[in-house]
Structures are given as structure tokens and as C-alpha cells.
Image (cartoon, grey):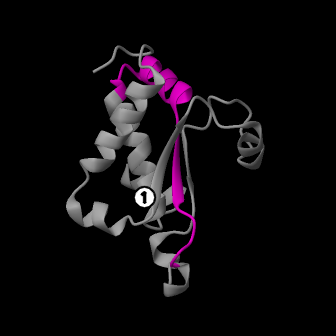
Amino acid sequence: MATIGMMNAEEFRLTAEKTLNSLPARFRLAMENVVIVTEAFADDDVLKEMQADSPYELLGLYEGRSFMERSARDSGALPDMIHLYRQPILAVCRDSGKSPDQCIAEVLMHEVGHYFGFSDAEMDMIE
């Protein structure tokens, strides 16, 4: 496990992948055509779209159609994406005292929840 704030981009990506791969098989197998993208921050267009005042406000983003909205017509579609933003997530770690692994897992699980059709409000209640 990396020291808070000292996790480089590759360590962050590998931790996110390891976390996704540790999901129970029934969830992993249901998550077809989903890619994890790790970036330092969300780009300006995403921040504007999400009405974020600071690049540190957005920890992750799910882009795609939820599992509940899918149909046979989606076959061959571009992959859905779960974006994880490294610097904001590591800042939360520093502020909360949680480990980077735990912070990454929490954000990733939140975005996986969106894949399965849960809203932000529903995810907040579950978390």
C-alpha cells in the first residue's frame, strides 16, 4: 500500500483494477463492456458539465447506460467508462486519514452503483 499522497498514476490504476477484480463474480460478470479510466483530474468540460467549482470536487464519474437501461440493441456499442480522478481521491485520503486503497474502493463502488442504475441519492443512502 502506498503512502497517502505518494501513490503514482500506475499504482493508482493497478489498485483500481485490483479493486474491480475483487468484486464478487456475479457483479463482475454482469459488468460487460466497462472500462476503468484513471486520470489526475476531470477535464474542464466535465467539471463544467457537472457544475463543479473546483477540480477537487469530482472524485469519479460513470459514463454510459446503466445495466437497467440496456437492451439487445446495445450490442457492439462503445464501452461504458468509470473515470477515477487520482488527485481529488488522494486529497480525500489525506483529509480523512483513510488509506488510498480504501478511498479508491469507495469511489469505485459508488461508480459501479451507477452502472447498476442507482442514483447519487440512492448511493449516498447505501454508503
Q: How many marks?
A: 1
Q: Position of residue 125 (x, y in %)?
A: 42, 54
- Furthest residue in direction bottom, as rendered: 72
Q: Write the start and end of the magenta stretch as one range.
A: 75-100
Residue 20 in the magenta stretch? The answer is no
Q: Residue 28 occupies which quadrant of the picture?
A: bottom left
At 30% from the left and 42% from the top, the residue drawn is 19
- Furthest residue in direction front, as rendered: 76
**Could you tell me which quadrant the N terminus lies in?**
top left
Tag 1: Cα neighbours inside 10 Å, few (<14), some, or many (≥20)? some
Q: Position of residue 120 (x, y in %)?
A: 53, 55
At 42% from the left and 55% from the top, the residue drawn is 112
Q: Position of residue 20 (x, y in %)?
A: 33, 48
Along the line of sight, the residue nearer the viewer: 48 or 82: 82
Q: Is residue 123 visible?
A: no
Q: Position of residue 118 (x, y in %)?
A: 47, 64
Q: In the rendered image of this protein, does residue 5 appear above or below residue 80?
A: above
**Element marked by disc 1:** helix
Q: Is residue 111 visible?
A: yes
At 38% from the left and 26% from the top, the residue drawn is 11
Q: Residue 15 occupies which quadrant of the picture?
A: top left
Indicate the amino acid at tag 1: Gly
Q: Mark 1 — residue? A: 113
Drawn side of residue 106 relative to residue 44, left or right: left
Q: In the rendered image of this protein, does residue 90 appear above or below residue 121?
A: above
Q: In the rendered image of this protein, does residue 13 appear above or below residue 75?
A: above
Residue 95 in the magenta stretch? The answer is yes
